[in-house]
């Protein structure tokens, strides 16, 4: 039996957390690790004479969940989402889908139930915004990478809210059937719509009335009142308090009280966030973590590898370049607050084993350390990936990133693309048909087995064949419209540069098809697998991806040869210009599709003199490509990494405008031997 009081419990929680979080910050780690350690110190599992009442601390920790979700909602608004989706939408979608699939596969391999495997996938699918923010504070990460990563995190937060709402409904101890999944999603959509419509009618008027008094007291009371009333209503409807708090934050933000609410609620949130993580730490038995050490290691390795590979590949495919994509993959390779919230929902519903929370705490600690370590060495990891990449891909990544940099301004036809609307309608109709067929599948199997005197297995196979026949027209039209959309996008890019070659267009079109297929296929498999078993769809997705990669590889070889030929012609032109006084010609004529070709001079005082191009590592550092070197007596087209830079060399650099700017700044920084060059990641 526990004695003491709530004041004593808070004294232990916040006092010990202050010390351990300070130690964590001194060690350049996230405060979350300090809070978890504080929880273990004052918890019942270690022989330390500091034991807070676990039930009281857990009750207080609910405030942390509510306030975290509220602040996330306040920081979120529909306009922000509209700006972020084009930047990070594809990468976030692929990453979340891959992590859900990976978690589900690990759970099924461990012979967990489908529901428990679903909770495991949800727990590891979302990175920790708190840990990532701390990583960015401790490491010099460039603005482009931060913008991309924060965009992914915003979309992850939105998906996590939906996951929390859906998984709360599934935490009943049964396998999520098709009917349950469909009804749960429909009910969730209805609740979200009712919340937002009602809130957008009532909340702005309340906020306008509050603003008349210009009182911080009224601001914070109004914001917190809406927060906890909304959380209580969501709980009453059978959803998590997190959903209600998030929606309240969105309504406050849309109502115009965003800055005041964020500024005033933030300190309160920070205190109760500490209580939340301390509560998680109190539930952790170190012996259980050690006993499940192999599982902790497997999950940690899975998170690091799948997060890194999915974000890196998706980032590159969506035009963010090698440097930004790899650094983002290293930044997001951990789990945190949402993992504990989702696992806690499963534990409260009795659908996951009680060891899951301690295991996830162990995974969070391991991945927090590895993320910090890997991000500090991001420069070397980017350089290593650039080095091992096939040469035909190395140069084309620069081309590819530059193409994406001008899609928004150079392909106006895409913005009015009629095939996008048709594609959305096709996919929506296909989804409705699949849901209806799955709802009636069992009845159809029994009907055919009875009427045609077939075995249930034969009847099930026949029903599956019928489903394929019914779905095939929708699949055909979806594929056709997506092909038209991709073709129109390619034509928009070609029209933006009259001389872009057929080879370049083919390479870019194949890449867009892979991007589109992954963006649709990975989330689809992640959704289908828990309820229906997605083995067949997974094989189809994998086979299609392999096919697209082979097409890209083949067209990349042709385009690489074309670029090299163009560079050699350009060098020949420079020689002729020097010896025969040939008139000036736009150099981009020799490299169709590249709008920028900038000369960068190497001065005699530059530290770059004598370096090989591999040592300069300009492509990995900036994303720009040295297409040629112009010298007094010779010119070098597509120089090799062993080529050494000489005094007064003129490096002809191409790439996106941002990459060229970074290259210019980097080489300029080498002109000052006494100054350290910037080490922006």
Image (cartoon, grey):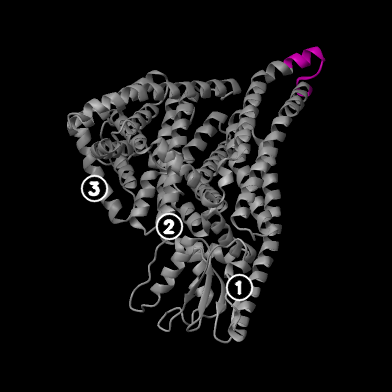
Looking at marks 1 and 3 on the same chain, the residue that comes earlier in the sequence is marked by 3
Q: Is residue 454 magenta?
A: yes
| Residue 510: percent from left, percent from top | 67, 51
Disc 1, SS: loop
Along the horizontal axis of the image, is 547 left or right of 102? right
Q: Quadrant of residue 101?
A: top right
Q: Does the image show residue 556?
A: yes
Q: Residues within 10 Å of mark 3 (few under 14, many from 20)?
A: few
Measured as percent of width and height from the top left, residue 228 is found at 30, 25
Kindly check if marks 1 and 3 are in contact, taking CB atoms under 8 A apart as contact.
no
**Span shown in magenta:** 446-458
- Relative depth, front residue between 443 and 553: 553
SS of the residue under disc 2: helix
Please indicate, yes or no, whether residue 319 appears anywhere in the rendered image: no
Please tell me which residue lies in front, 405 or 560: 405
The residue indicated by pointer 3 is 19
Q: Which mark is residue 638?
A: 1
Q: Circle 3 sits in a helix, a strand or a loop, which is it? A: helix
Residue found farthest to the top = 451
Mark 2 neighbour class, 10 Å CA radius: few under 14, some 14 to 19, many 20 or more? many
Q: Tell me which secondary structure the magenta stretch mostly adopts.
A: helix
Res. 17 image quadrant: top left
Looking at marks 2 and 1 on the same chain, the residue that comes earlier in the sequence is marked by 2
Mark drawn on residue 375: 2
Image x and y of residue 425, in percent? 62, 30
Earlier residue among tags 2 and 3:
3
Q: Nearer the viewer, mark 1 or mark 3?
A: 1
Q: What number of labels is visible?
A: 3
Q: Residues within 10 Å of mark 1 (few under 14, many from 20)?
A: many
Q: Which is more toward the observer, 44 or 6?
A: 6
Distance from label 2 to label 1 (Cα)?
31 Å
């Amino acid at each position: 039996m526990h004695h003491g009081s709530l004041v004593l419990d808070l004294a232990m929680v916040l006092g010990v957390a202050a010390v351990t979080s300070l130690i964590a910050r001194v060690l350049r780690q996230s405060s979350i690790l300090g809070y978890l350690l504080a929880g273990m110190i004052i918890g019942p599992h270690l022989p330390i004479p500091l034991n807070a009442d676990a039930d009281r601390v857990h009750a207080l920790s609910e405030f942390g969940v509510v306030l975290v979700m509220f602040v996330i909602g306040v920081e979120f608004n529909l306009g922000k989402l509209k700006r972020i989706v084009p930047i990070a939408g594809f990468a976030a979608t692929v990453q979340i889908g891959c992590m859900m699939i990976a978690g589900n596969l690990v759970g099924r391999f461990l012979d967990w139930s489908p529901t428990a495997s679903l909770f495991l996938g949800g727990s590891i699918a979302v990175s920790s915004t708190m840990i990532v923010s701390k990583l960015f504070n401790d490491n010099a990460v460039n603005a482009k990478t931060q913008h991309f990563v924060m965009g992914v995190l915003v979309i992850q937060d939105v998906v996590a809210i939906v996951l929390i709402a859906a998984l709360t409904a599934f935490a009943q101890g049964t396998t999520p059937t098709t009917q349950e999944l469909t009804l749960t999603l429909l009910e969730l959509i209805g609740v979200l719509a009712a919340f937002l419509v009602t809130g957008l009618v009532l909340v702005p008027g309340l906020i306008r009335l509050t603003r008349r008094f210009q009182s911080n007291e009224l601001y914070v009371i109004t914001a917190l009142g809406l927060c906890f009333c909304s959380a209580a209503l969501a709980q009453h409807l059978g959803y998590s308090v997190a959903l209600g708090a998030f929606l309240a934050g969105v309504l406050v933000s849309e109502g115009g009280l965003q800055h005041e609410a964020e500024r005033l609620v933030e300190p309160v949130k920070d205190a109760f966030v500490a209580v939340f993580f301390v509560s998680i730490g109190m539930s952790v038995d170190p012996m259980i973590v050690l006993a499940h050490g192999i599982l902790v290691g497997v999950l940690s390795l899975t998170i690091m590898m799948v997060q890194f590979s999915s974000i890196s590949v998706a980032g590159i495919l969506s035009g963010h370049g090698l440097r930004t994509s790899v650094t983002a993959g290293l930044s997001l390779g951990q789990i945190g607050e949402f993992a504990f919230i989702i696992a806690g929902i499963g534990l409260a519903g009795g659908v996951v084993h009680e060891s899951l929370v301690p295991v996830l705490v162990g995974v969070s600690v391991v991945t927090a350390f590895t993320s910090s370590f890997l991000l500090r060495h991001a420069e070397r990891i980017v350089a290593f990936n650039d080095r091992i990449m096939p040469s035909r891909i190395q140069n084309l990544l620069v081309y590819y990133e530059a193409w994406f940099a001008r899609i928004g301004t150079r392909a106006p036809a895409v913005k009015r693309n009629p095939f996008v609307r048709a594609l959305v309608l096709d996919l929506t109709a296909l989804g409705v048909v699949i849901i209806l067929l799955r709802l009636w599948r069992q009845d159809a199997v029994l009907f055919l087995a009875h009427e045609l005197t077939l075995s249930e297995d034969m009847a099930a196979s026949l029903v599956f064949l019928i489903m394929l026949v019914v779905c095939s027209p929708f699949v055909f039209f979806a594929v056709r419209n997506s092909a038209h959309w991709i073709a129109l996008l390619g034509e928009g890019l070609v029209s933006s540069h009259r001389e872009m070659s057929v080879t370049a267009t083919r390479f870019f079109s194949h890449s867009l098809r892979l991007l589109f297929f992954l963006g649709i296929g990975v989330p689809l498999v992640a959704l289908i697998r828990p309820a229906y078993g997605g083995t067949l769809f997974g094989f189809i997705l994998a086979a299609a991806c392999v096919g697209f990669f082979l097409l890209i590889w083949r067209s990349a070889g042709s385009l690489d040869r074309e670029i090299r030929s163009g560079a050699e012609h350009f060098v020949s032109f420079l020689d002729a210009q020097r010896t025969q006084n040939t008139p000036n010609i736009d150099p981009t004529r020799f490299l169709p599709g590249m709008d920028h070709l900038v000369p960068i001079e190497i001065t005699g005082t530059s530290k770059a003199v004598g370096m090989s191009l591999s040592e300069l590592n300009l492509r990995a550092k900036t994303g720009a490509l040295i297409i040629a070197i112009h010298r007094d007596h010779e010119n070098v087209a597509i120089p090799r990494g062993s080529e050494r830079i000489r005094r007064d060399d003129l490096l002809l650099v191409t790439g996106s405008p941002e990459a060229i700017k970074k290259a210019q700044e980097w080489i300029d920084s080498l002109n000052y031997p006494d100054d350290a060059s910037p080490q922006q990641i």
